């Protein structure tokens, strides 16, 4: 969404709000499998002593896939986004600096960048997820599979002894 800042750009203390829904389905990178429905974006841009400052909240639901057992779970994501808008933002290395396009701000660009920059790199359905058996693929959270009854090497030696 392009937000018109003409009414605040020259007037310290003024602000303009926004509240809309946007499509972030292209932002589904692992461990997120899918973004469910539209993302809600709300917030405002305020002229703070001549500096255009954005604060926003992003809310969406996403399907996460567990790193270990591949179990899927839909979870809510809430993010607080802070950004500064400036004509020369391209020259800045500050990840919270974003460009102005004339008198406009590109809110989607800010939301997508903030979302991807702070994305989780992995997710576990629970901290002690036991994962899948590497041999039979069974979900070990549901209990041990038949391959886990592997013989203790010390007992194996005893077995050989008994066979003789
Ligand atoms: Zn898991
Ligand atoms: Zn197994």
Image: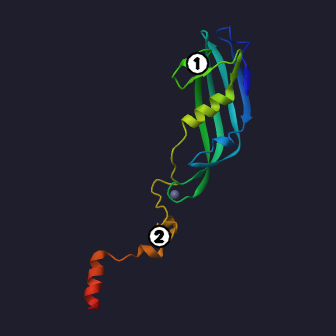
Res 135 label: 2
For marks 1 and 2, the one nearer the N-term is 1
Task: Using the rendered view, name the quadrant where residue 18 is placed.
Answer: top right
Q: Quadrant of the N terminus?
A: top right
Relative height, residue 82 to residue 134 (above, below): above
| Residue 149 percent across, percent down from the top left | 40, 76
* Color scheme of the displayed model: rainbow
Q: In this orientation, which residue lies closer to the viewer: 135 or 58? A: 135
Residue ID for mark 1: 89
Taking the image as shown, residue 135 lies to the left or right of residue 18, namely left
Name the residue at 25% across, 87% down: 161
Name the residue at 68% across, 39% down: 24
Relative height, residue 122 to residue 110 (above, below): below
Taking the image as shown, residue 145 lies to the left or right of residue 72, namely left
Res 134 label: none
**Cα–Cα span, label 1 and label 2:** 52 Å
Asked if residue 8 shows in the view, the reply is yes
């Amino acid at each position: 969404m392009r937000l018109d800042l003409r009414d605040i750009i020259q007037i310290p203390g003024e602000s303009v709000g926004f509240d809309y829904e946007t499509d972030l389905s292209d932002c589904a990178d692992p461990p997120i499998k899918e973004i469910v429905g539209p993302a809600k974006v709300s917030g405002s841009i305020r002229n703070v002593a001549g500096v255009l400052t954005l604060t926003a909240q992003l809310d969406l639901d996403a399907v996460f896939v567990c790193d270990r057992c591949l179990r899927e779970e839909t979870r809510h994501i809430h993010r607080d986004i802070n950004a500064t808008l400036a004509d020369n933002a391209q020259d800045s290395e500050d990840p919270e600096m974003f460009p102005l396009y004339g008198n406009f701000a590109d809110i989607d660009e800010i939301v997508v960048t903030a979302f991807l920059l702070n994305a989780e790199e992995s997710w576990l359905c629970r901290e002690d997820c036991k994962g899948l058996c590497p041999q039979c693929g069974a979900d070990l959270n549901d209990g041990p599979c038949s391959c886990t009854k592997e013989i203790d090497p010390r007992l194996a030696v005893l077995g050989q002894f008994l066979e003789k």
